[in-house]
Amino acid sequence: MLQTVPYRSFLAHHGVTNCYPRKTMQPAKPPVLKAILTDVHFWLPFAVLIIGIALLAVLR
Amino acid sequence: MSTAISNTARSRLSLHTLGVVCGLAAGAWLGGAEAPAKLVTMGFSPFLISLGMVAGVFVARWTLPIALQGTGNTWRDLREKPHLIVWAILAGMLWAVANTLTVFAIQNVGLSIAFPLWNCNSLVGLFWGWLLFNELRGAKVQQWGKVVGGAIAIAGGACLLAYATTTQSSGHAGSRTAMLGVFAALGAGLLWGSMYIPYRKAYISGMNPLSFVTVFTFGELGTVFTLAILFDGGSQRVMAQLNQAKPALFWLFLGGFCWVIGDLFQQYAVKYIGIGRGIPLSNTNQLWGLAWGALVFGELAGQSNEARILTVAGSLIMILGAVAVSLGEASALEQASWKMAMQRECTRYGLDPAQIEASLQGEDTLSRGKSSRSPWEILVIAAAVGLFVWLGLLARRQAIAMNVGWMGLLIGASLVLLVVAGLLLWRRTRFA
């Protein structure tokens, strides 16, 4: 009797574990805006920019 | 497979050496960018001069860089890393605000005081590189000495040069005005130093410098234009001034063209050797600015012996600093720390670590064997070049005495650096 083996299991059996046969199975990217806004690296230069604009307003 | 084959044909030059050459080439071209601006005689507002130059930068982006890498790669790069569009615009805005602050700083306290203050940008960048991107983490004391000592020497040498080459004093300004000028200069240093956060962020995410510069110029032009409108009497006045300045615009555009080349080399330096090493090297632009001023425009004529000694001493200190930074190659331990910063970006923004790693090793992960140019790209190049030619035809020779022999020599030296650094980049990374 023939036994069917799921495609991913077959690949895993042969050592292929990082294969995504369909694009829809790839891990989703995190939402861009959320990733930026929760990145402390973004707020540092942004705060510096605000300081610079405030300085310009005073100098004007 | 095609990537593997093309990689075998590439040079095995170390990325550190490549980054150092790019940093030095950046210094030459960023310094040379000051020369055409010098040709613009007085009478135009500082905002207008800044706007003209940034407009030149914007147009120049669509000449040589687009010829090096087609827009197809740029769009692909931006689609894969859309978060970096925000970062590149932020970097452009930081540059524009910092540049405007320097105008006020020079007005209030003079160049000799303002320049050393904003030249602290390399030390600010060094700090951000250490804090946020693991630069110098795991480095031995010797490396620390070479990089930090070299950066301090370059900043110190620049201070000496600024002091020796300017005769302006802060005596003309009131105490409040002088204090505001000092704050403006310090603010410019802080902004320019922090601008390297987006730069480094882009490159540990595997972005191509040509893609980053494209978006950067939009942020830069938009902000400078807005600032000119806000501070220079509204849009109608700015447009009228631009129209009036047409005979001088070519020189500003030429300055912008040189600046784009310098900035591209600076970006490659940041990509391959980091902020801490790349920025002090590109800050040697002060040496080139001095060479243009002193040798071509005769700015140091009639200087006292004391000033001449200070000028030579400042130049030597800067050169020694650049040599020290050049010798401070990152150790394997430090490079492992860089990789951790890269991994963090991959996790946060959903990037492929293998692809980013390849990009940081100078592999071209974008072209995928495609290098054709679409007809509309050729049209864009023709339009940008045409604008330069049109402004060139309108340009009037400015009444400034120049030493043509020295000018030829400096242009020749800058072109040699352009060709050498460009060839090394092409052979090692295919401009990746």
Image (cartoon, rainbow, N blue to C red):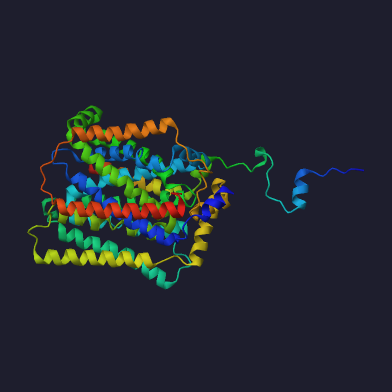
Foreground residue, B80 or B411?
Answer: B411
Image height of A34 relative to B362, above or below: above
Residue B159 location, quadrant: bottom left
Residue A1 at x, y percent in the picture: 92, 43
Q: Residue at x 87, y 44 (%)?
A: A3
Q: Residue at x 29, y 37 (%)?
A: B55
Foreground residue, B417 or B76?
Answer: B417
Image height of B109 relative to A26, above or below: below
- Disc count in the image? 0
Foreground residue, B399 or A34?
Answer: B399
Residue B182 shows in the view? no
Left/right placement of residue B243 relative to residue B270 reads left
Residue B370 at x, y percent in the picture: 51, 40
Residue B153 shows in the view? yes
Residue B377 at x, y percent in the picture: 41, 33
Left/right placement of residue B429 relative to residue A24 reads left
Q: Residue at x 89, y 43 (%)?
A: A2
Q: Residue at x 33, y 31 (%)?
A: B383
Left/right placement of residue B405 relative to residue B86 reads left
User: Which residue reaches farthest top?
Assistant: B236
Left/right placement of residue B14 relative to residue B161 reads right
Residue B97 at x, y percent in the picture: 30, 44
